[in-house]
Amino acid sequence: RTPAMLRTVVRVTTASIVGLAVLRMAPRLSIQRRRAPLAADNGASSRGTPKLRVLSQNIWNSFFAGGPARLERVKALAHVAKSLDVDVVVVQEMFALALGPVVDRVECDAGERVMREVGLVHCTRFDATLPWLGQSSGLVVYSRHPLSREQHGIFAQRRAVSCKGWQTVEVQAPHGSLTLVNTHLEHA
């Protein structure tokens, strides 16, 4: 790996509270200080190091404990992704629900459609962890850049109707590849 690639490494750790804390601390953990707001950022630092903008969000679309206005939240996330001009959106709780052979994937399909409309044309499989009965892991990554080496895992200790776990995917950005890890932990 080149020094430029090492400077572009992004660590994304997402879980309900842990993810928010890590993302909130990210500017303090960064080696390079942000000089301008995201809207004025040209995609490169003052040292010429390429940047990859990553947004992580729990969309709160659980079939069992999610909030109201599910489709509106999906559309709002696409609007925010466009306004911040992000390259990758990492999502938790974009659940599909299986009841035997019947699958409810309305928000998943809507998410893929609205993210494509804002330029995030590549996405991971939302149904990779879909059980015969219950919710998928709810983990999805949308990207402007091609995605490869997608992997999913399900936690051994979890609720019976939920397949929470982890996901890894490689983003093929113009300045090199980057492996992202997305997770959503079970609550106590």
Image (cartoon, rainbow, N blue to C red):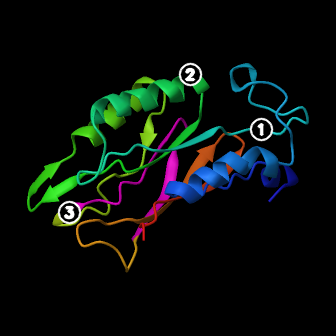
The magenta stretch spans which residues? 134-153
- Marks 1 and 3: which is nearer the front? 3
User: Disc 3 designates what residue?
Assistant: 134
Looking at marks 1 and 3 on the same chain, the residue that comes earlier in the sequence is marked by 1
CA gap between label 3 and label 2 equals: 34 Å
Residue 14 visible to the viewer: no
User: Disc 1 designates what residue?
Assistant: 50
Element under disc 1: loop
| Image location of residue 16, percent across then percent down | 49, 55
Q: Amino acid at mark 3?
A: Gly
Q: Residue at x 41, y 67 (%)?
A: 186
Say if 69 sits above or below 140 in the image: above
Crowd tier of the residue under label 2, counting other residues whose Cα lies within 10 Å: few below 14, some 14–19, many 20 or above: few
User: Disc 2 designates what residue?
Assistant: 83
Q: Residue at x 64, y 43 (%)?
A: 173
- Marks 1 and 2: which is nearer the front? 2
Residue 53 visible to the viewer: yes
Q: Residue at x 31, y 63 (%)?
A: 129
Can you tell which quarter of the image residue 67 is in? top left
CA gap between label 1 and label 3 equals: 41 Å
